[in-house]
Image: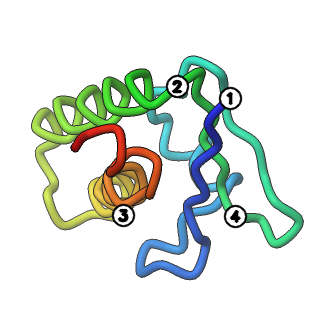
């Protein structure tokens, strides 16, 4: 199981609660919250995480407001996935 942490101290202040409010696609193995309310994305493996990041990227292209909190949150999630050390090792 691969767990990717998305910190809540980002510009969009994305956390477990706001993720649900944005009605974004949920990762295949779900989401969880840390004690500090950071968002934890759960995946079976790196391939599944990359596919989810690609899905979010496609989803973001469909949004008309490219400056809103929802769009910003999507990009923060994508960056958290792509910057994860296991994802980077997998992609090499």
Q: Residue at x 30, y 63 (%)?
A: 72
Q: The residue tagged with tag 4: helix, strand or loop?
A: loop
Question: Of marks 4 and 1, which one's residue comes earlier in the chain?
Answer: 1
Residue that label 4 marks: 38
Q: Position of residue 22 (x, y in %)?
A: 49, 45
Question: Of marks 3 and 2, which one's residue comes earlier in the chain?
Answer: 2
Question: In front here: 23 or 87?
Answer: 87
Question: Of marks 2 and 4, which one's residue comes earlier in the chain?
Answer: 4
Question: In front here: 74 or 29?
Answer: 29
Q: Quadrant of residue 76?
A: bottom left
Q: Is residue 44 left or right of residue 90?
A: right
Q: Which mark is residue 45?
A: 2
Q: CA distance from mark 1 to mark 2?
A: 6 Å
Q: Position of residue 83 (x, y in %)?
A: 35, 60
- Within 10 Å of disc 2 (Cα), the crowding (few <14, some 14-19, many 20+) is some
Residue placed farthest to the right in the image? 35
Question: Of marks 1 and 2, which one's residue comes earlier in the chain?
Answer: 1
Question: Of marks 4 and 3, which one's residue comes earlier in the chain?
Answer: 4
Residue that label 1 marks: 1
Residue that label 3 marks: 69
Picture layout, residue 30 above or below residue 2: above
């Amino acid at each position: 199981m691969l767990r990717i942490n998305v910190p809540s101290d980002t510009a969009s202040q994305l956390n477990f609660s706001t993720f649900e409010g944005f009605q974004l696609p949920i990762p295949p193995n779900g989401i969880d919250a840390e004690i500090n309310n950071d968002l934890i994305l759960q995946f079976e493996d790196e391939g599944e995480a990359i596919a989810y990041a690609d899905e979010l990227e496609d989803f973001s292209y469909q949004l008309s407001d490219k400056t809103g909190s929802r769009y910003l949150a999507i990009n923060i999630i994508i960056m958290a996935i792509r910057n994860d050390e296991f994802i980077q090792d997998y992609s090499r």
